[in-house]
Amino acid sequence: MDKEKILVVEDDEIIKASTATRNTIRERKTYQIINSIQTGSSGDKMTLDTSLVNLVKNNKISKEGVIFCSNNKAYVGKSLFSDKT
């Protein structure tokens, strides 16, 4: 039996508590935060899924486990498996 190497990479979602984010939370519209992160990805905002895709593209992790670990499997699948670059 072949043993697989397992690489552990720490990755997470981080969003700074901007005025807009605080208002969204105060208004109990937290479901809108993910859209805020995705549309405002200027470098300081990035979803876990986008970060995982970047790790695969930079050959830090393999594609096989990324779908399992992702929050938005459709986005990750589309980003990794339909990208021809």
Image (cartoon, rainbow, N blue to C red):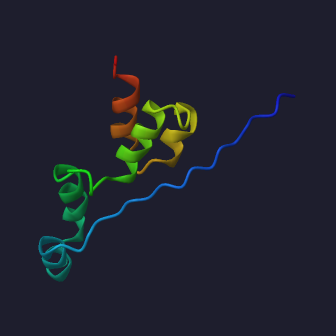
62 sits to left or right of 75? right
At a point 39% along the width and 52% down the height, the residue shown is 48
Looking at the image, which is closer to me, 5 or 28? 5
The relative height of residue 26 versus residue 3 in the rendered view (above or below) is: below
The relative height of residue 7 versus residue 31 in the rendered view (above or below) is: above
Q: Quadrant of the N terminus?
A: top right
Q: Quadrant of residue 12?
A: bottom left
19 sits to left or right of 58? left
Q: Quadrant of residue 73?
A: top left
Direction top: furthest residue: 84
The percent coordinates of residue 59 (x first, y second) are 51, 31
At a point 23% along the width and 74% down the height, the residue shown is 17
Q: Quadrant of the C terminus?
A: top left
Picture mark count:
0
At a point 40% along the width and 38% down the height, the residue shown is 54
The percent coordinates of residue 3 (x first, y second) are 81, 33
Direction right: furthest residue: 1
Q: Quadrant of residue 74?
A: top left
The relative height of residue 48 versus residue 16 in the rendered view (above or below) is: above
The percent coordinates of residue 83 (x first, y second) are 34, 22
Looking at the image, which is closer to me, 44 or 76? 44
